[in-house]
Amino acid sequence: AQHRAGDAGCAFAGAAVLVAWADGTIDDKERAAVLKAAAEGHVAEGSAGHELLAGWLKQKPPAALFETWSAYTKAIAGPLDAAHRAGLRDELLGRAKRVAESAGAFLGLGSAVSSTEAAVLQKLEAAFA
């Protein structure tokens, strides 16, 4: 079974938003990376999903977003065979990690991914377990 592009796009966008807000703020580089992840995930500009995403980029989404995202992701990944599920996971986590890396390390020192972003990435990966 294959996932539909729109379904996966919502999962990509939700994951990107969760990572972008991990440290409690979102900067222009993260915002641009989230929008890029959404476009790559087939979230069409002007669609209801894109409008919701735009709102989340202006104001931090509710704390329940992770639980909602996790349940949604499990619902679309569950019916997939192992290879497709792994592909979806890897693509989703790759895009989410690029969002985390987009802000860069402070003064170029240390990891480009903060500890709070790394923790969110681990939670996202756990949704595929």
Image: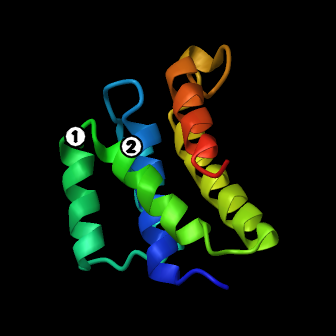
Q: Residue at x 22, y 62 (%)?
A: 52
- Amino acid of disc 1: Pro
| Residue placed most toward the observer, 109 or 49 | 49
Instruction: Note whether 44 is above or below 68 in the view shown.
Output: below
In space, the residues marked 2 and 1 are separated at their CA atoms by 9 Å
Q: Position of residue 106 (x, y in %)?
A: 54, 17
| Residue placed most toward the observer, 45 or 4 | 4
- Amino acid of disc 2: Phe
What residue is disc 2 on?
A: 66
Q: Residue at x 65, y 84 (%)?
A: 2
| Residue placed most toward the observer, 71 or 114 | 71
| Residue placed most toward the observer, 109 or 7 | 7
The quarter of the image holding the N terminus is: bottom right
> Contact (CB < 8 A) between labels 2 and 1?
no
What residue is disc 1 on?
A: 62
Q: Residue at x 57, y 19 (%)?
A: 115
